[in-house]
Image (cartoon, rainbow, N blue to C red):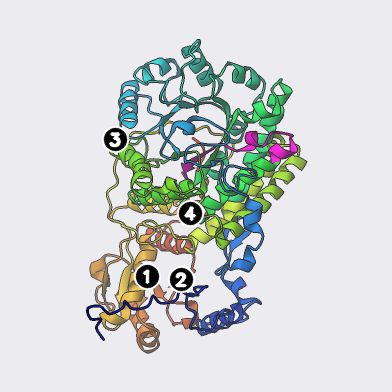
Amino acid sequence: MTVGHGSPPPAEPEAPEVLQLAGEFPAASRAQWRDLVAGVLRKAGRDGLPEPVEEALRVPVATGVTVAPLYSAEDADELPALAGVPGLPPFTRGARAGAAGVTAAGGADADVPTGWDVRQRHADPDVAGTREAIAADLENGVSSLWLVLGEGAVPVESLADVLADVLLDLAPVTLSGGTPAAEAFLALVEGRTDLAPGGCLGLDPLGLLAATGEPQSLDGLADRARRAPDGWRTVVVDGTVFADAGASAVEELGCAVAAGVAYLRALTAQGLTVDEALGQLEFRFSASADQFTTIAALRAARRLWDRVGEASGASPAARAMRQHAVTSSVMTTRHDPWVNMLRTTVACFAAGVGGADVVTVQPFDAALGLPDAFARRIARNTQGLLVEEGHLARVIDPAGGSWYVESLTESLAQAAWAWFTEIERAGGLAAALSSGLVAERIGTAWAERSQRLATRSEAITGVSEFPNPAEKLPVRRPAPPPPSGGLPRVRTAGAFEELRDAVEAVEPRPRVYLATLGPVARHTARATFAANLFGAGGLHTPAGDGAGGLAEAGTTVACICGTDRDYAERAAELAAELRSAGATQVWLAGPPSLAVDGVDGYAHAGCDALAAVRTVLEQSLGAEMAISAPVDQEARA
């Protein structure tokens, strides 16, 4: 009906007092969800399901910490209250209170309107090149510098030249290089009172002990703290040393807190008050592409450090942890390095959401050597995009209140605190490093993760999944060698890339012929799976119908690809045909339960991909492969 001239307007509809989304449907219960999940798992062949059924779907994310498939209010009933509010103890929800960039602990970010300090790392020994790179960074969004000084990196004696064009009253600097670097910088700025706050001398004797195995002294830390510029910090507690050795978030957090406590004791023993000592520490953590674990780990770290400060009698404001998040070296790959741009974007996002005060995005080519200008530009623009276009800094602790994130934060905090107290019972971090306790614990964590990597239950895009065996890698100048002799350095892609290096050193390159059964629609899924699996080791995978293409493929290794029905009808016969055509090794894309006669191995979801590729290589080349997979223990050299 239309409303004519002079007719009264229609009545406003009454709004309900409570708006219930999907209110017309009956409420779903967790019990109903469990029944549905159990039905799906049974159809997939999963028998002997645990009670409750969701335990079958838990995924490990750190030592002793798993993630459930479903979270509800009952999983985090009291946790938001424990987290407090932003800017106040226990600082779980962030050191910032109010406007972005203002922290309870003060520092450079009080003047940074973008929400966090964008810090770029420089380690190129070419002084002129480094000066040029620094200028480009500072002109294009970087707000502070991280200089690596010493052997193979920026020469200590060239520090003044490197910083000649830098306005130190605007851009703070953080150093890596130990006492020589710190002393060189203090001499350079002696008498100046105009330096921008937020810099750090970067002293980390315990991190150096972990990396080199050589005993280090904590003497003189307070003296340098007294000589440091106003608003600067003296010590960096570098948790990335432990992460780079294969530690999960639990070991990284526990070791970092243990190191922080050791420095706190040393500084107060050398005459600083507890509040003064806390103000001299900056914590550095790795940020990985596992975004929720990174977010929760940064939140948990602040809570743990607040507890240490509280037990030490520090004032509430002094207990706020200053955090520097660095995108993880462990997750970077040498092969298909461009995917690292995506990994570091996710990690940077997680660092920002997790409340880091400072963020460094490593260039995508970091695993190949010194980055070029393009890689550095993409690294800094990653942060600029997230802040300026994504407006990531406009909300404090956006993950706060999430049942999942709050539960994961609590689990990481509890597990890391237990590990920290174990280190303390062993005599502190230095003693735990010297006794091998830390190395053993981290080695166990890495071995467990290596198994997940080998079976591809934890995927590495571009390496263990969707590899490109024909790619041409960019060439970079060698990066300065990190300290060696202590904890190892590992990368998730290391074992796969070691196999690929071995394959690519052989001419002609070993191949696996994919012998397909049936029409394309039937064999495509398993042929694609097999190509991915063998391609992860650098093997080319030419395909053809049946056994006819084996000779043209130039290999004696074949993999049959089709459906279960095709296998039942033709696989055993095809295996025999492949043998007659010269195949010395026949695989089948499918589970071992198919039990096809004449097949040597099965390529299936959950199989050890590294072992499969190694087997192919050993038989193809007629020699045992000297590959250290699945655990890649790269020396710090």
Q: Helix or strand or loop: what does disc 1 sit on?
A: helix
Q: Quadrant of residue 520?
A: bottom left
Residue, disc 2 = 605
Q: Is residue 451 left or right of residue 160?
A: right
Q: Quadrant of residue 120?
A: top left
Task: Determine whether 553 is above or below 134 in the image.
Answer: below
**Mark 3 belongs to which amino acid?**
Ala
**Mark 4 belongs to which amino acid?**
Gln
Label 1 vs label 3, nearer the camera: 3
Q: Residues within 10 Å of mark 4 (few under 14, many from 20)?
A: some
Q: Helix or strand or loop: what does disc 3 sit on?
A: helix
Looking at the image, tell me whether mark 1 or mark 2 is earlier in sequence order: 1
Is there CB contact under 8 Å for labels 3 and 2?
no
For the record, the magenta segment spans: 308-330
How far apart marks 3 and 4 lie (CA) works out to: 27 Å
**Mark 1 belongs to which amino acid?**
Phe
How far apart marks 1 and 3 lie (CA) works out to: 37 Å
The one of 277 and 491 positioned closer to us in this rendering: 277
Q: Residue at x 45, y 31 (%)?
A: 111
Residue, disc 1 = 529
Looking at the image, tell me whether mark 1 or mark 4 is earlier in sequence order: 4
Residue, disc 3 = 373
Label 3 vs label 2, nearer the camera: 3
Is there CB contact under 8 Å for labels 1 and 2?
yes
The one of 554 and 452 positioned closer to us in this rendering: 452
Residue, disc 4 = 291
The one of 19 and 596 positioned closer to us in this rendering: 19
Q: Residue at x 73, y 45 (%)?
A: 421
